[in-house]
Amino acid sequence: MLQVINLEKSFGGIKAVNGCSFEVSKNTITGLIGPNGAGKTTVFNLISGFHAPDGGKILFNGSRIDPLPPYRVPHLRLSRTFQITRELKKMTVIDNLMVAPLNQMGESLLNSWFRIPSVKHQEQQIKDKALDVLDFLEIEDLKDEYASNLSGGQKKLLEFGRTMMTDPELILLDEPGAGVNPTLMKKLNGYIEKLQRRENMTFFLIEHDMDLVMKLCNPIIVMNEGKRLAEGTADEIQQNQEVLDAYLGG
């Protein structure tokens, strides 16, 4: 589904991504791990269009996406979350979800003037879907709460819900466990597994919680110094001496 080929990115004199290549297969939960500064989030930013690569290619479902601006990438059904949540603070939880779907009729001035019934019908459909997402994430009781009032974990769920509203085939999750208590993290893991199993969604996630990665992800890709260092199952990664050296400073 996703192919990263010889990807390169520098910031000043720092080579953040250095000839990195890997693939993410359809209907998997693939983990991306590595020491701090390995280039993991930079790779996510390159895939999602927030940075332009200096070299290499990124293909999604066989088509190159690295030349695309970030607002075009979700139209290909590829969505992402961020390490630090980016909720619309002065809007309610349900409104945060309802702005996420693409190509809404109400975004056209002509439609809002001359196709009012159709616009209202679509808006009701989007609202119903948002309520279904909130119910799935077990936060429907927060639908009228302002996003700024949510806890850190609730904001993570809200951001995850917004990706679901775009009907993605692939979701990039950047440290979904950061700032989330263990109980909520266990729930989030369950949501990811359900969507992968029932909806055939594919997940690619960065995470520093090794217990979470080892239980949830297969395969696991390891980066170090901007490159792919290793790839394999949880058992293979845990027994890989190069991986151990990278984490322990060998």
Image (cartoon, rainbow, N blue to C red):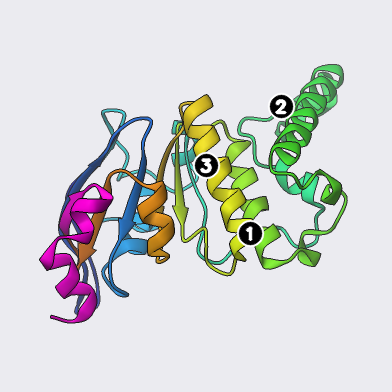
Q: Is residue 87 visible?
A: no
| Magenta stretch: includes residue 232 | yes
Q: Is label 3 or label 2 in front? A: 3
Residue identified by numbered label 3: 192
245 to 6, vertically: above or below: below
Task: Decide if residue 210 is on the left or right side of residue 37.
Answer: right
- The image position of residue 194, as x and y in percent, is 54, 34
Question: Which of the two discs, 2 and 1, sits closer to the camera?
Answer: 1
Task: Give residue 105's mark.
Answer: 2
Residue 96 x %, y %: 73, 48
The local crowd at label 3, few if under 14, some if 14 to 19, many if 20 or more residues have their Cα within 10 Å, is some
User: Earlier along the polypeptide chain: callout 3 or callout 2?
Assistant: 2
Q: Quadrant of the N terminus?
A: top left
Q: Quadrant of residue 248?
A: bottom left
Bounds of the magenta segment: 229-250
Q: Earlier in the sequence, mark 3 or mark 1?
A: 1
Identify the secondary structure beneath mark 1: helix
Point out the tag, 2 or 1, that comes first from the N-terminus.
Answer: 2
Distance Cα–Cα, label 2 vs label 1: 39 Å
Label 2: element kind: helix
**Are the residues tagged 3 and 1 within 8 Å (C-beta)?**
no
In the figure, 33 relative to 169: above or below?
below
Front in this rendered view, residue 155 or 232: 232
Rendered residue at 84%/26% (across/down): 113
106 w.r.t. 24: above or below: above
Residue at x 59% of width, y 63% of height: 182
Is residue 174 a member of the stretch shown in magenta? no
Residue annotated with mark 1: 183
Residue 92 in the image: state x and y as whole percent.
Answer: 82, 52
Give the quarter of the image for residue 101.
top right
The three-letter code of the residue at mark 3 reads Ile
